[in-house]
Image: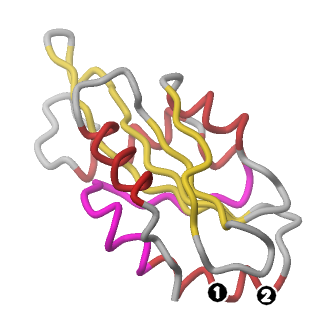
Amino acid sequence: MADCTDPAINDAYQEVRKNSNINWLLLDYEDERSDKLLLTATGNGGLSELKERLDEGKASYAYVKVTYANDKESTREKFILVIWIGSSCKVMRKAKISVHSADVKSVLRVYSIEVAARDKDDLREDPIVSRLRKAGGASYDGV
């Protein structure tokens, strides 16, 4: 079981959900052997800034607000949960991710899609926005 009790996690989650300029948060394990998750970063630069913070040797969780144009008159804000498993992540850590993800989802509760990322290229904005549009229901532009 992952320990997600750090109060800073919920505080950052609420901040991302509000209309603030903070639009992502990153959770990492306290150390290689620990199952305790800590808030390690927040930012306002969206997916591109988040990608810079991801470590190939770690498993991490991120919560991101993605803003995109629905049509020329409107924009939408949707939230995604990113489950990051870097290419150099240790086998035992990888093995625990599926169980720990459920614990993380109980804290970072509201999101439109989950993105499993193994490579930073998995976090390109265009394919994610396309998935968000499909998940969002009505689409008037044929996407």
Residue 8 left/right relative to 58:
left
The image quarter in which residue 84 lies:
bottom right
Name the secondary structure under disc 1: helix
* Residue 36 coordinates in the image, percent (x, y): 59, 74
Left or right of residue 54, residue 61 in this image: left
Question: Which residue is located at x 37 percent, y 71 percent?
Answer: 105
Asked if residue 14 is positioned above or below residue 57 in the image, the reply reads above
> How many labels sit on residues?
2
Give coordinates of residue 3: x percent, y percent: 50, 78
Q: What is the quadrant of the C terminus in the image?
A: top left
Q: Is residue 50 left or right of residue 6?
A: right
Residue behind mark 1: 96
Local crowd at mark 1 within 10 Å, few (<14), some, or many (≥20)?
A: some
Q: For mark 2, what is the residue?
A: 92
Image quarter for residue 50? top right
The residue sitting at 25% across, 57% down in the picture is 110
The correct choice, above or below, for 130 with respect to 115 in the image is: above
Residue range (magenta): 102-119
Q: Amino acid at mark 2?
A: Met
| Coordinates of residue 120 in the picture (x, y in percent) | 71, 45
Secondary element at tag 2? helix
